[in-house]
Image (cartoon, rainbow, N blue to C red):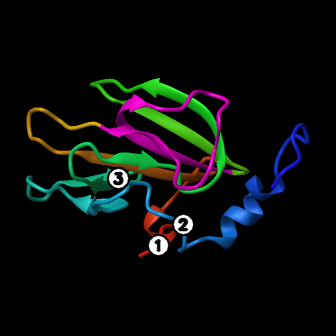
Amino acid sequence: GSVVGSGRNNSIQSGYFERYKGRLPWPADKGYISGHFGVQPHPVLKHVTINNKGIYIQCPPHTNARAIYEGIVTSRFALPGGGWAVIIQHGNYRSVYANLTNIYVREGDRVNAKQSIGQIYTDEDNGKTELQFSIYYGNSLQNPENWITR
């Protein structure tokens, strides 16, 4: 536990985050990886590639996104084209949860691992409920699949 008023809890520091590489909980209650990190063939167009900044996790409707590690909510903002994103700071690392609706946290909130931060938005056109999830170390993108538990 931490002492009230003691400022930052040391476990938020990056060194602790790094210790959990490959063992962090999934950023969704349930689902499967429907889009991998990095350059991928386009799902429909031949000879076209897409470069994913994170991974996509397809989930059942009404699934919550959840924090992968304790941290501080540094921003929540509307995305162009709909949906919301939440960014959580973990020392030098940040986790980004996009395509949300019904956000449960505010900027400045301290969150715990596995705490629900918002509901994943369901696209009315195609019925997909898909979380876009990214991890940054400073400004460099990480492959989230190397961080979350298999």
Q: How much space separates mark 2 and mark 3, taking CA atoms?
A: 20 Å
* Image quadrant where residue 98 sits: top left
Q: Secondary structure at mark 3?
A: strand
**Point 83% across, 45% down: residue:** 8
**Point 48% across, 32% down: residue:** 104
Front of the two marks 2 and 3: 2
Q: Secondary structure at mark 1?
A: loop
| The label number, if any, that marks residue 52 in the structure image | 3
Q: Which residue occupies the foreground of this view, 9 or 87?
A: 9
Q: Which residue is mark 2?
A: 24
Q: Is residue 5 above or below residue 91?
A: above
Q: Residues within 10 Å of mark 2 (few under 14, many from 20)?
A: many
Type of secondary structure dominating the magenta stretch: strand
**Point 49% across, 71% down: residue:** 146
Q: Which residue occupies the foreground of this view, 2 or 83?
A: 2
Q: Secondary structure at mark 2?
A: loop
Residue 41 spot, x, y in % from top left = 20, 61
- Looking at the rendering, the stretch of residues picked out in magenta corresponds to 93-120
Q: How much space separates mark 1 and mark 3, taking CA atoms?
A: 20 Å
Residue 114 spot, x, y in % from top left = 52, 55
Q: Which residue is mark 1?
A: 149
